[in-house]
Image: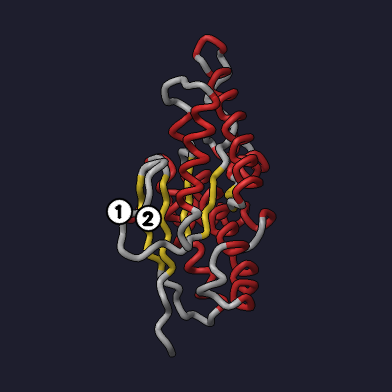
Amino acid sequence: MSEVTPLRIFAAVEQCEQRAIALGSDLLSRAVASARQGQAQPIKLAIGLPCHEHKGEEPPHVIVASMLNEVLGPREDETIIHERWHRYFEKLLEGPSEVFICTIFRHVPGRVRASGNDETLERIRRLNLLAVELSHSLGLRVVDYNRVLAHFGARPLATDYRLGGNLATYVAGHTLASAILANGIDELVDPQVQEGARAALGGLDDIPEQIRRFAKAVRDAAAAG
């Protein structure tokens, strides 16, 4: 059996998103292995801060970028934010990597106006619109956290825009793995294997049962530890 080239992923994300990125990478690897009759797909995952570039010797096959840092950052003119991210993604696209942009789950804890939540929601809305605009104008791939997490709801997932909690981590990780399988690894994985991996990963309707198994595994690990 020939040696499999590792899939190199670089994620420029906030700390609160890193668990979902790691889990998504693991789900992706497992799905491909299932479609290859157990032959593993190794993944080399590197993490950086938002709006940073990869500094390793070998370029990543996949770059995943988040704009979550803009949500609670200092208020800036919208034009400045647009120009900053447009330049950043243009730079990333000069390389060989498939570049993915993440939307942000549009939910904040509580809805008390005095707490500033309305402003936070508006920032998220504008950033998600920017993500769509950039995907259209530059050809970025999209990891649509907002759409998929909204499908299940913030209350059942016990989460908000920061993706806290094990259930939200799983859903976000699944969303990432699904997006990469749909768009990002033709160079490494045969299309027929990708099709089998997508079937192994499952779709939205499969996530609730997967979540139940995942939550049980987390509880069992906690009890054993």
What residue is rendered at 62% in x and 54% in y?
207
Residue found farthest to the top: 114
Q: Nearer the viewer, residue 145 or 101?
A: 101
User: Residue beneath label 1, please?
Assistant: 225
Q: Residues within 10 Å of mark 2 (few under 14, many from 20)?
A: few
What residue is rendered at 52% in x and 40% in y?
86
Residue 96 percent coordinates (x, y): 48, 63
Q: For this view, does 90 lie left or right of residue 134? A: left
Q: CA distance from mark 1 to mark 2?
A: 6 Å
Q: In the figure, 159 relative to 9: above or below?
A: above
Q: Is residue 222 visible?
A: no
Q: Quadrant of the N terminus?
A: bottom left
Q: Residue 134 lies in what quarter of the image?
A: top right
- Are dots 1 and 2 in contact, CB under 8 Å? yes
Q: Nearer the viewer, residue 193 or 73?
A: 73
Q: In the rendered structure, which amino acid carries the disc numbered 2?
A: Ala
Q: In the figure, 57 relative to 129: above or below?
A: below
User: Residue beneath label 2, please?
Assistant: 221
Q: In the rendered structure, which amino acid carries the disc numbered 1?
A: Gly
Task: Identify the image's colour scheme: rainbow, by chain, secondary structure or one colour.
Answer: secondary structure
Residue 98 percent coordinates (x, y): 52, 59
Residue found farthest to the bottom: 1
Residue 116 percent coordinates (x, y): 51, 15
Q: Is residue 103 visible?
A: yes
What residue is rendered at 30% in x and 63% in y?
57
Q: For this view, does 218 lie left or right of residue 103? A: left
Identify the secondary structure beneath mark 2: helix
Residue 46 percent coordinates (x, y): 35, 56
Q: In the figure, 222 relative to 50: above or below?
A: below
